Amino acid sequence: MAAVTTQKCSVRRTILRRVATLVDQLIQVNEAADRTRVQMLAAGVSDANIKLAVDKILAAGGPLTGTDGSTALAEADELAIVNQLVNMLNGTQATTTIYTAADTRVGWQYLAE
């Protein structure tokens, strides 16, 4: 599939709003991980167990497969948040349950409405 180079402003706007939503979701995942870390520290949980718990929370927003071969906590039929962002901005051909990659890749040249 050829890379998207031209795009209507209205289409680009829709895609970029989706990017903003995904970034907000990543921030929420990070905040949840930090709240859990603080609570576990206060409860006297070991560093190793804190790491395990926080890594599971962070995996929900990260790539589908971790370096240890584990699967992220994303829904089985949808890409993790980071993967969605990479696909949208780099134009890879993976799909999400919402759009196909052709619909979500950002083109940075003008196309008439």
Image (cartoon, grey):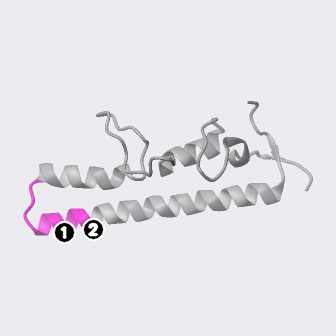
Q: Circle 2: is it few (<14), some (14-19), or many (20+) Cα within 10 Å?
A: few
Q: Nearer the viewer, residue 103 or 16?
A: 103
Task: Give the residue furthest to the top.
Answer: 1
Q: Which residue is mark 1?
A: 39
Q: Measuring from the top left, give residue 19's x and y in whole percent.
A: 60, 56
Which disc is residue 35 wearing?
2
The quadrant where residue 20 appears: bottom right
Q: Quadrant of the N terminus?
A: top right
Task: State left or right for residue 24 relative to residue 35.
Answer: right
Magenta residue span: 35-46
Residue type, label 2: Arg
Task: State left or right for residue 36 relative to residue 4.
Answer: left
Task: State left or right for residue 64 relative to residue 13.
Answer: left
Which disc is residue 15 wearing?
none
Q: Measuring from the top left, give residue 10's x and y in whole percent.
A: 80, 60
> Looking at the image, which residue is at 67% across and 44% down?
100
Q: Are marks 2 and 1 in contact (CB under 8 Å)?
A: yes
Query: Label 2 to label 1, Cα distance in Å?
Result: 6 Å
Residue type, label 1: Gln
**Local secondary structure at mark 2:** helix
